[in-house]
Every structure is written in structure tokens, then in C-alpha cells.
Image (tube, helix red, strand yellow):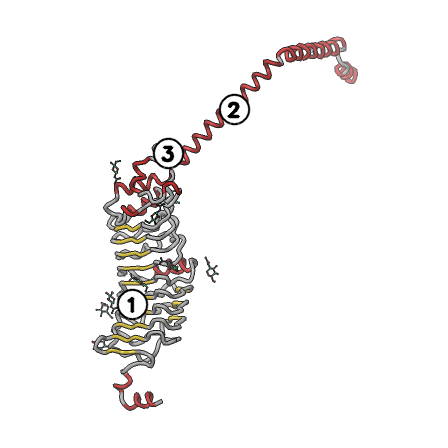
Amino acid sequence: MLRVLLCALLASACASCPPRCECSEAAHTVKCVSRELRDIPSGIPGYTRNLFITGNQLIRISSESFRGLENVTNLSLSNNRISALDSRAFSGLPRLRSLDLSSNQLALIHPEAFTVQNQSLQELNLSRALYNHSSVMDLATSLRWSSLGTLRGLDLSNNGLVFLPPRIFSHLGGLRRLQLANNSLVALHNATLSGLERLEELDLTLNALKTVPEEGLRELDSVPGAVLLLRKNPFVCRCGIEALALWLNRSQGRVGDAGGLACAFPASMRNTSLLAVGALALGCHQGGGGADLALQTSYVFLGIVLGFVGLVFLLVLYLNRKGIKKRVYELRDTCREVWEGYHYRFEADPGPRPSQGAAGDV
Ligand SMILES: *[C@@H]1O[C@H](CO)[C@@H](O)[C@H](O)[C@H]1NC(C)=O
Ligand SMILES: *[C@@H]1O[C@H](CO)[C@@H](O)[C@H](O)[C@H]1NC(C)=O
Ligand SMILES: *[C@@H]1O[C@H](CO)[C@@H](O)[C@H](O)[C@H]1NC(C)=O
Ligand SMILES: *[C@@H]1O[C@H](CO)[C@@H](O)[C@H](O)[C@H]1NC(C)=O
Ligand SMILES: *[C@@H]1O[C@H](CO)[C@@H](O)[C@H](O)[C@H]1NC(C)=O
Ligand SMILES: *[C@@H]1O[C@H](CO)[C@@H](O)[C@H](O)[C@H]1NC(C)=O
Ligand SMILES: *[C@@H]1O[C@H](CO)[C@@H](O)[C@H](O)[C@H]1NC(C)=O
Ligand SMILES: *[C@@H]1O[C@H](CO)[C@@H](O)[C@H](O)[C@H]1NC(C)=O
Ligand SMILES: *[C@@H]1O[C@H](CO)[C@@H](O)[C@H](O)[C@H]1NC(C)=O
């Protein structure tokens, strides 16, 4: 009450600091850390450039959440319980450059959630921010619709992502750094990385890549300026890995951790450097993949089985040759009898019908 009264009397006291927050005018910084706040506090001073509302209980951010904060460039809402981002949730922050939403539970992300009139956003941290893999569809839509052409850095690590929708990053033409570490990505499909012409760093460490077939290698080659990090993936050093091993040999300059990549399976190859696998030749068919080899093996097998069946058939014929001869003679005799019977009936008996017809005419 006293504070409100003071505010009414002295305008400068109002500009001081919201309750449960710490403000530093000299550093242009306001921090409201671990104070169980459920909403963005009102009365945040206009000089604020760095705003931290972290470790609280925020649940939803709407276009009403931030008003009149034209100087804020850095906003951290990390470690809250934010599950919904409404349309233009940050449009009250026209100079926002860096937005940290890490460690939240985003389930509903409006297609225009990240739109800021000025297109000023450069850094977006969504590390451990998605509620579950289903949120990635909302996110993909939002990354396309929110006019994020100026974004330089995007952190999507620690999210349990299983796949990335095609063209998810296609509207982020200015992106330089993309963190995808510690997800569960099993493959890079066509068009996953399309639109990232200016990428300089792509972190794929600690995912679930067992190999990277031609399709994925084409994707990695579609971002030629990017340094790639691929460590701590469970690479399986069987026939399917050859393409990756060859690619690695000629792309070592681009793969920041090429020397650290190792086989995880089979057990006999564990810890073998992936660079050495290329030289070892895994006993796979050259040129073709493992599937080709399997197909050829099965054709050979089929040929042997058919040949064997044919031999047995011929043997049976040979052993039975007397019986067969007898049968053939019997068959011939039967045929002859039938033929003779036919002749006998039709030649001895010219048929009743023509005579009947003739009789009818008369
Ligand atoms: C934003 O900062 C500028 C320069 O420091 C200042 O003149 C202006 O009043 C600030 N805006 C608000 C709403 O306080
Ligand atoms: C847009 O952003 C730029 C750079 O961050 C800033 O200088 C400019 O004042 C902003 N424009 C408005 C209308 O806020
Ligand atoms: C604000 O964000 C920029 C990146 O846009 C970063 O370089 C800078 O260190 C941040 N400042 C603070 C106080 O967090
Ligand atoms: C994003 O936030 C996490 C957790 O706060 C932090 O560890 C990480 O360094 C941030 N990412 C970037 C690119 O700054
Ligand atoms: C994600 O959570 C939502 C809501 O609880 C649920 O309906 C959906 O099936 C979950 N998706 C996954 C992939 O677990
Ligand atoms: C990977 O992400 C999960 C959350 O998705 C987290 O619990 C785990 O600690 C992370 N692991 C590492 C090594 O960062
Ligand atoms: C990926 O592209 C290649 C050639 O561009 C095509 O042959 C292949 O079928 C595509 N894969 C998928 C899953 O669309
Ligand atoms: C790359 O391949 C070439 C030709 O097969 C081989 O001579 C070279 O040793 C390989 N490099 C590495 C690092 O394995
Ligand atoms: C593989 O390497 C790790 C760490 O470098 C080590 O702890 C582990 O014992 C190695 N395993 C084998 C089978 O060599």
C-alpha cells in the first residue's frame, strides 16, 4: 500500500523496480529470479535492456505480456513452465535480439508466436523447451510464419526430437549456427536442411544416427560452408556404413570432430575410428550396397535349389523307365481303341439327323 501511495506521489518511485525483482539502472538490467511469479510483473522500468524472469511459474505468454519495453534487447524466460506462446507474444519488444526460452514445456506454439514487427530477433534458444516430440510440428509452422529471416542462432538441443519435418528451416536464410545436439534423430531426409545456405555450424552430437546413407550425405553437402559435429552417435560399422566412411575421408576438413567418430556396434568393432573403416572394406560387395549382396546371394541359392530339384526329377524318371514305357504303351492302346470305336460308330451309322431333316421337308 505504501508503495502504491509513493507511486502516486512520486513518478520516479514508480519507475524504480517491480516487487520481487532486482533492478540496475546502470547496467540496464532487471532480474526476477526464482520468485514463484505466475505472470510478467508490471512496472518494469523503460530503461531495461536485459530482462531475466527465470526459474518462475510462468505458463503462458501473450501479446499483452510485454508493453512499452522498447529498450529490451535480451530476454530470458528460461526455467519456467511455459506451455503456450500466443500470436505475436513478443511484439511488445520491438528491439528484441536474443530470446531464451530454454527449459520450458512448450506444447502450443502459435504460427506467428515469434513475429516481432522489426524482424530484429537474432538468437533463439529452445534448448529443452519442447514438451514432447509432437510440438515440433507447431514449431516448424512457426519457424516458417514468424518472419525470422534475420535469425543467426537457433538452439534446439535436448528436445528428444525423432525427426525433423521437411523444410523446417527453409525460411531461416540468415541462420549461422544450428544446435541439434542430444536429440533422437535417426536420419536426415531430403530437404531437411534446405534453405540454410549461410550455415556455419551444425551440431548433431549425441543423436541416434546409426549411419548416414546417400540421402543424408546429400543433405550435409547442401550446407557446404558449415562445420559439422557428429560425435557420440551409435554408428553401426556394417555394410551400410561404407558411404559415410568414404564421405568422411574426403570431408575431413568440414567435420570438426572427424577423428573422434567411432563405431559403437558390432562389439568387435567398438571404438574403431570411422576413418579406419573406409580402408578396412567390410567384406561388402564393391560398388553396390549390402542389399545388393543379399539379393545376389539369394539368387545363387535359388539356382542351386532348382538345379537339385531338376536332378531328382530326372533320376526318378530314369529309375522308373520300364514302368513309364509300359504306361506309354497302355496309353497308346487305349487311344487306339477309342479312335477305332469312334470310327466304327460314325462310319457304320451315318447319323439319323439328315434323314429326319429330309423327311420333314418332304
Ligand atoms: C529507452 O532508452 C532511451 C535511451 O537510453 C531512452 O531515452 C528512452 O526513454 C528509453 N525508453 C523508455 C520507454 O524508457
Ligand atoms: C529496429 O531494430 C533496429 C536494430 O535493432 C533499431 O535500431 C530500430 O530502432 C528498431 N526500430 C524500431 C521501430 O523499433
Ligand atoms: C545479449 O544477447 C547478445 C546476443 O544477441 C549476447 O551477445 C549478449 O551477451 C547478451 N547480453 C546479456 C547481458 O545477456
Ligand atoms: C541455451 O540455453 C542453455 C540452457 O540455459 C544453455 O546451456 C545454452 O548454452 C544456450 N544456447 C546458446 C546457443 O547459447
Ligand atoms: C505429446 O503430448 C500430447 C499431450 O499430452 C499427447 O497427446 C501426444 O500424444 C504426445 N506426443 C508424443 C509423441 O508423445
Ligand atoms: C539430454 O536431454 C535430456 C532431456 O531431453 C536430458 O535429461 C539429458 O540430461 C541430456 N543429456 C545430456 C548429456 O545433456
Ligand atoms: C530423395 O531424393 C532422391 C533424388 O533427389 C530420390 O531419388 C529419393 O527417392 C528421395 N527420397 C525420398 C524419401 O523422397
Ligand atoms: C582416405 O582414403 C585414401 C584412399 O583410399 C587413403 O589413402 C587415406 O589413407 C584415407 N585417409 C584416411 C585418413 O583414412
Ligand atoms: C571405448 O572407449 C571408451 C572411452 O574412450 C572406453 O571407456 C572403453 O573402455 C572403450 N571400449 C573398448 C571396447 O575399447
Give the spatial CA distance, label 3 vs label 2: 26 Å
Q: Is residue 229 left or right of residue 337?
A: left
- Type of the residue with mark 3: Cys
The numbered disc on residue 284 is: 3
For label 3, the crowd category at 10 Å Cα-Cα, with few meaning under 14, some 14 to 19 and many 20 or more, is some
The numbered disc on residue 306 is: 2
Q: What percent of the width, then of the height, locates residue 224?
A: 25, 48
Question: Could you tell me which residue is drawn at 28 percent across and 59 percent down?
Answer: 153
Q: What percent of the width, then of the height, locates residue 155?
A: 32, 59
Q: What percent of the width, then of the height, locates residue 328?
A: 65, 12
Going from the N terminus, do you reach mark 3 or mark 2 first? Answer: 3
Judged from the image, the secondary structure of the residue bearing numbered disc 2 is helix
Residues 92 and 162: in front is 162
Question: Could you tell me which residue is drawn at 33 percent across and 35 percent down?
Answer: 281
Judged from the image, the secondary structure of the residue bearing numbered disc 1 is loop
Residues 332 and 162: in front is 162
Going from the N terminus, do you reach mark 1 or mark 3 first? Answer: 1
Q: Which residue is mark 1?
A: 117
Whether ligand 2 has any atom under 8 Å from the Cβ at mark 1 is answered as: yes
Classify residue 244 by image quadrant: top left
